[in-house]
Amino acid sequence: MGLDNHEFEQIEGLIAARKRVKRQQHLYHAGDPFEAIYAIRIGFFKTDILTEDGRDQVTGFQMAGEILGLDGISIDRHVCNAVALEDSDVCMIPFDRLEDLSRKVEPLQRQFNKFMSREIVREQSIMMLLGSMRAEERLAAFLLNLSQRMQSRGYSASEFNLRMTREEIGSYLGLKLETVSRAFSKFQDEGLLTVHQKHIQILDPDALRTLVGRAHV
């Protein structure tokens, strides 16, 4: 993060608690007071909101090395639910202490701003892409995004397990479950990837990139 040892030790001192969240348990609910952000040490989460017609709308997926809780900054209350998709561990960082230390450690403030900016750009890019894409293009973009995030955290970019269900993927991408399943089957038939239950192996990432690129033509 561009911090020296002393500054990093100060960051470690911010961690108020480490919390274990079991699969399908909530880390926080929509409407809960915003008090902290959460760094995911181990595990995988989804965020969702309850729509007016009673459906759970998935708004994102977060993995180890990423941050949860930023949705609460603007109104001091969380606007979505955070649910563990597998047994997970998080570090709780009280936001008021983070703000105070950011004023004392300038590199921390810069890095936090960069992180916030990356998250905003990533979410906007995904929404813009999905708004103009067909079903297969949406799924290809989703898999490539997940692959890149896996690789940046030291995992395999081509082979991984999906922690979310196909129904949850469909909710996130604005697609029906049957449409997601057909797209996976088509990709497998065309040799772009193999699917065994939740295990994915991307065989032809260039073909997926080409498919996504067509949405901009």
Image (cartoon, helix red, strand yellow):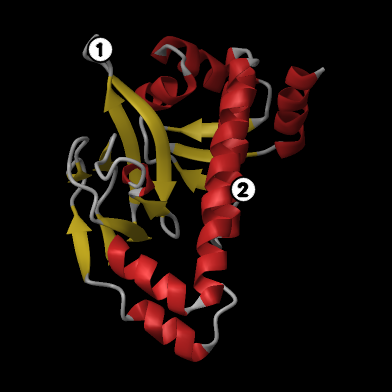
Label 1, residues with CA under 10 Å away: few <14, some 14-19, many ≥20: few
Q: CA distance from mark 1 to mark 2?
A: 34 Å
**Sequence order check, earlier mark of 1 and 2:** 1
Q: Which residue is mark 1?
A: 52
Q: Is residue 152 left or right of residue 40?
A: right
Q: Position of residue 201 (x, y in %)?
A: 57, 41
* Residue 56 against residue 155 in the figure, above or below: above
* Residue 175 against residue 165 in the figure, above or below: above
Query: Residue at (26%, 40%) from the top-left corner?
Result: 78
Label 2, residues with CA under 10 Å away: few <14, some 14-19, many ≥20: some
Dividing the picture into quarters, in which one does residue 36 lie?
bottom left
Q: Is residue 21 visible?
A: yes
Q: Which residue is mark 2?
A: 148
Please, what secondary structure does the residue beneath circle 1 have?
loop
Give the label on residue 147, or none. none
Query: Residue at (54%, 22%) from the top-left corner?
Result: 184
- Type of amino acid under label 1: Glu
Query: Residue at (28%, 17%) from the top-left corner?
Result: 51
Query: Residue at (33%, 37%) from the top-left corner?
Result: 47
Q: Position of residue 170 (x, y in %)?
A: 43, 20
As drawn, the residue found furthest toward the right would be: 217
